[in-house]
Image: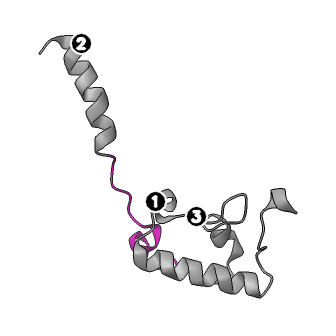
């Protein structure tokens, strides 16, 4: 292969295999998911108030379920809003 073909090939292969993200809760067992910790929960909510997906946040399935449950619990107790800032 010629040099420009190798460069082009490397460019496309780089996107095919992204680095694996580790779940921040699995990596740090001391970090707990709690409905009262609104600062942590806000990181996992979009501007419109939707819960961000696993793909966007990099959390594992187990912790994503726990996050969703705690966010809903926090919304129910009026610690977090149901809608985002732009919709109020």
User: Where is residue 65 drawn, in percent x and y?
Assistant: 49, 80
At 76% from the left and 74% from the top, the residue drawn is 82
Quarter of the image holding residue 17? top left
Q: Residue furthest right?
A: 88
Q: Residues within 10 Å of mark 2 (few under 14, many from 20)?
A: few
Q: Is residue 61 above or below residue 56?
A: below
Position of residue 46 in the picture relative to residue 8 (left or right): right
Is the residue under label 2 in contact with that under label 3 (CB below 8 Å)? Answer: no
- Residue receiving disc 2: 4
User: Where is residue 54 drawn, in percent x and y?
Assistant: 47, 65
- Residue receiving disc 3: 52
Is the residue under label 1 in contact with that under label 3 (CB below 8 Å)? Answer: no
Is the residue under label 1 in contact with that under label 2 (CB below 8 Å)? Answer: no
Q: CA–CA distance between discs 2 and 1? A: 33 Å
Q: Quadrant of the C terminus?
A: bottom right
Residue 38 or residue 71, whichever sits in front:
71
At 42% from the left and 67% from the top, the residue drawn is 23
From this viewpoint, is residue 33 visible?
no
Decide which of tag 3 and tag 2 comes sooner along the chain.
2
- Residue receiving disc 1: 55
Position of residue 75 in the picture relative to residue 13 (left or right): right
* Magenta span dominant secondary structure: loop
Q: Residues within 10 Å of mark 3 (few under 14, many from 20)?
A: some
SS class, disc 2 = helix
- The segment highlighted magenta reads 18-32
**Magenta highlight on residue 30:** yes
User: Where is residue 43 drawn, in percent x and y?
Assistant: 63, 63
Q: Is residue 3 above or below residue 34?
A: above
Quarter of the image holding residue 76? bottom right
SS class, disc 3 = loop
């Amino acid at each position: 292969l010629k040099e420009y073909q190798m460069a082009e090939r490397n460019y496309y292969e780089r996107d095919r295999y992204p680095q694996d993200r580790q779940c921040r809760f699995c990596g740090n067992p001391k970090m707990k998911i709690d409905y009262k910790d609104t600062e942590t929960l806000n990181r996992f909510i979009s501007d419109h108030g939707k819960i961000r997906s696993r793909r966007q946040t990099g959390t594992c399935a187990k912790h994503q379920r726990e996050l969703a449950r705690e966010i809903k619990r926090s919304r129910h107790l009026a610690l977090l809003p149901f809608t985002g800032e732009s919709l109020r």
